[in-house]
Image (spheres, rainbow, N blue to C red):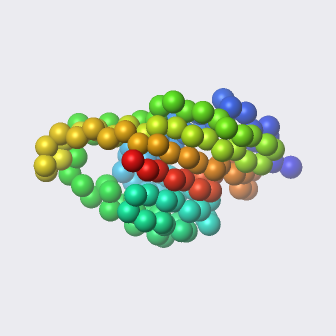
């Protein structure tokens, strides 16, 4: 029996907030426990399957020298929930100042969250501009 059941919209939004906060630390060790071992992350620049590939993608982004960085999710919509998974859509917002000046990016995302070892984890994440 999963100790986190039932999956609720509130738990999903709280999970996404924790994932967002953990990502903001720029340390993969803080997010790895929230990602399914067989996860697939699809970004504009390609697909990353498994924790090692996902780690490389995160750390490549984090090597960018960004000042006043802000990253957050908005317009979160829980599309589907069952006893072991959920599908969520959202907008991601990323802004700051880098080597080429200030930037502000708004894109769309979809995540499949799944229970794994009794905890919600990201199984699939697709971000696009």
> Can residue 102 be seen at all in this image of the molecule?
yes
In the image shown, does 95 or 44 lie closer to the viewer? 44
Relative horizontal placement of residue 46, taking residue 89 as reference (left or right): left
* 2 w.r.t. 40: above or below: above
Residue 64 is situated, as x and y percent measured from the top left of the image, at 24, 55
- Give the residue displayed 50% in from the left and 45% down from the top: 109
* 129 w.r.t. 54: above or below: above
Q: Residue furthest front?
A: 129
Relative horizontal placement of residue 94, taking residue 3 as reference (left or right): left
* 5 w.r.t. 45: above or below: above
Residue 125 is situated, as x and y percent measured from the top left of the image, at 54, 53
- Give the residue displayed 22% in from the left and 46% down from the top: 66
Residue 15, image quadrant: top right
* 20 w.r.t. 52: above or below: above
- Give the residue displayed 65% in from the left and 35% down from the top: 78
Relative horizontal placement of residue 99, taking residue 17 as reference (left or right): left
């Amino acid at each position: 029996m999963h100790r986190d059941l039932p999956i609720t919209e509130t738990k999903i939004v709280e999970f996404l907030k924790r994932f967002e906060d953990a990502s903001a630390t720029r340390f993969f060790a803080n997010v790895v426990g929230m990602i399914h071992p067989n996860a697939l992350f699809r970004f504009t620049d390609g697909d990353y399957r498994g924790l090692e590939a996902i780690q490389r993608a995160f750390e490549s982004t984090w090597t960018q020298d960004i000042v006043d960085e802000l990253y957050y999710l908005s317009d979160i919509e829980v599309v589907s929930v069952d006893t072991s998974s959920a599908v969520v859509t959202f907008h991601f917002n990323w802004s700051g100042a880098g080597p080429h000046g200030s930037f502000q990016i708004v894109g769309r995302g979809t995540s499949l969250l799944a229970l794994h070892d009794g905890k919600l984890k990201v199984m699939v994440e697709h971000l696009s501009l």
